[in-house]
Image (spheres, grey):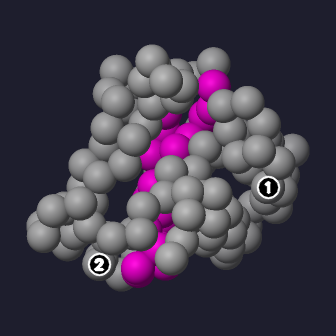
Amino acid sequence: LINHTRLGAAGEHIAAAALILGGWSPSIINADGFDIIAVRKGATMRVQVKATKKPFLPSQYQWSCSVGKQKRPLTIADCDVLAFTVLDLRRTLFVPVARVCDQITFKLPIARLHEADIEHESLTAVTFAF
């Protein structure tokens, strides 16, 4: 069995590996609002990792994109990027926090995570501004 802490730690390492392959230098730090600080060519990116171990429904994954018992949606004040990680596929989808700042959950069809370049494409898209 995997508890919540181990699930989060595994997700952080999977996301960190994707960041390394994308040319970033990540450090897992578990600060308030974000789990990873990543640096590349003088740019800094705060990454909040959200992990799940299996699909929520037969056709989709679902993650929480909120913080605290009050389920406050994450904002740019918390982090720059969300890393939605799935343990069963060992893959990560990177999404700018501004895209989900009004949501408490994020849902994604399973097929999207099976796309060959999902990590690279999503990381390139979110880091274009950095």
User: Which residue does the image show at 33% across and 71% down from the upper left?
Assistant: 54
Image point 36% across, 81% down: which residue?
A: 116
Q: Nearer the viewer, mark 1 or mark 2?
A: 1
Find disc 1 in the rendering and name its residue. Answer: 28
Residue type marked 2: His
Q: Amino acid at mark 1?
A: Ile
Residue 48: x and y, percent? 61, 43
The one nearer the camera, 130 or 64, is: 64
Drawn side of residue 123 relative to residue 112, left or right: right
Q: First in sequence: mark 1 or mark 2?
A: 1
Above or below 81: residue 59: below
Quadrant occupied by the C terminus:
top right
**Number of other residues with Cα within 10 Å of mark 1, as a class: few under 14, some 14 to 19, many 20 or more:** some
Residue with the mark numbered 2: 114
Residue 99 painted magenta? no
Q: Relative to residue 113, is residue 39 depicted above or below?
A: above
Is 66 displayed left or right of 55 in the figure? right
25 or 53, which lies in front?
A: 53
Q: Position of residue 37 (x, y in %)?
A: 78, 46
Is there any visible trace of residue 22 in the rendered image? no
Asked if residue 84 lies left or right of residue 111, the reply is: right
As drawn, which residue projects farthest toward the right?
Answer: 42
Q: Secondary structure at mark 1?
A: strand
> Which residue is pictured at 56% across the width and 64% down the height?
3
Residues rendered magenta in the picture: 78-97
